[in-house]
Image (spheres, rainbow, N blue to C red):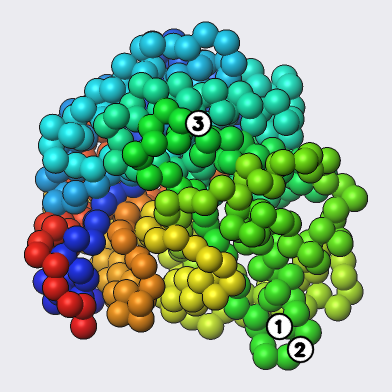
Amino acid sequence: MYDPKLLAARFPGDFTFGVATAAFQIEGASRADGRKPSIWDAFCNMPGRVYNRQNGDVACDHYNRLDEDLDLIKSMGVKAYRFSIAWPRIIPDGTGPVNEAGLDFYDRLVDGCKARGIKTFATLYHWDLPLTLMGDGGWTARSTAYAYQRYAQTVMRRLGDRLDSVATFNEPWCIVWLSHLYGIHAPGERNMQAALYAMHTMNLAHGLAVEAVRSEAPNVPVGLVLNAMSVIPGSQSEADLAAGERAHQFHNGAFFDPVFKGEYPPEFVAALGDRMPMVEDGDLKIISQKLDWWGLNYYTPLRVGDDPARSGDFPWTLEAPRVSDVKTDIGWEVYAPGLKNVVEDLYRRYELPECYITENGACYNMGIVNAEVDDQPRLDYYSDHLAVVADLIKDGYPMRGYFAWSLMDNFEWAEGYKMRFGLVHVDYETQVRTVKKSGKWYRELASQFPKGNHKTT
């Protein structure tokens, strides 16, 4: 564990420390003030999809406890809040009438942050697609990209004058592969062709949203949040190294290449291109507009080896053995060097703008004992990974900020409420918030900023 003041001294004085959440995971109030169901509301109601059929109807009741939670953020010492905006609150059917009450809520959220001196980093889409759009095919339908552009325009017209930053999407990998190929997230598809259609629609929607943001709020920096995989080959054999490259193209290149190079990866296209939708003239130009920043969500590495049998679809990899025997309560390997590995690799491959770590954190499920939550392993995770970020800054990488995932325990998607990532413990029966040991440590670190710039060591 690092002393927070000593660790703080390794960061530039204008480095941004923040906390992150997502609308569906914390807001609750799923039927309030004109909101209609999202694909996640439907998915939660399907047996066998979410742990114990738990749902987001109440979650952390953030919708009704907004001021109290903004006070909590301020008390955490952070200067920035990364939150997402729920499309089903703004345009409940995805297309059609705009719901003013939904916009009013985010007005209050943004104004509340401003009043407390907290910077606003909004994410326009964190997985809660309006359910009505599934009638047209959801993310597999090209029309969804244009519906999304209008939604982005609507939000930015209302909030753009007060936002400090905006991201078009959170984690395309999850929207595409986890939701349409592996079936683990809503809408629960298990079909490569559906996933490939969703991939291109989502990439196009990103580009169209960049245009919408810049037309409505040209002074707001716009970016994209990617959970890039830190791909680590299981050995230095030629076969495993080639498997690592294929894994990169599949997990990262499917999104980075079109956005930052204006093309899809070559081996990826050779293997899967016949199942992809038509890439229309001009699509890649729209997708590859220059961004002001990008966000990296990192939790755990992806270790791969070659699958000589070439079973199933590209990228033909097998899971390689872990190097670290430390794992979180959700089963993810703890390996801080993986964060350094993925940043170095991506800046080597692409011309990338400045970077924010938009999510980083650990799942540990300790409860309250004597009014305290002693989550030392989470604290260790944070301090180790923040030390890596400091190393990257020292090495000249443009790391501008860090957002802890998450502010508080919340609805953890398919895992329901059994997995806890928060710096703040939530008792879901009483909605009482209790700052954990890790949260107190993070507060001490974050409250050192901003300060006069100094040379990093």
In this view, which residue lies farthest toward the bottom?
237
Residue 122: quarter of image: top left
Amino acid type, mark 3: Ala
Does residue 408 show up? Answer: no
Amino acid type, mark 2: Glu
Count every numbered label the image shows and give the total: 3
Residue at position x 48%, y 25% from top? 153
Q: Is residue 435 left or right of residue 125?
A: left
Residue 177 spot, x, y in % from top left: 68, 50
- What number is the disc on residue 238? 2
| Residue density around tag 3, few if under 14, some if 14–19, many if 20 or more, within 10 Å | many
* Picture quarter with the N terminus: bottom left
Q: Which residue is mark 1?
A: 241
Residue at position x 78%, y 84% from top? 239
Nearest to N terminus: mark 3 or mark 1: 3
Residues at marks 2 and 1 touching, judged by CB atoms closer than 8 Å = yes
Residue 121: quarter of image: top left
Residue 48 spot, x, y in % from top left: 65, 37
Q: What whole-number distance in Å separates the C-alpha atoms at marks 2 and 3?
A: 45 Å
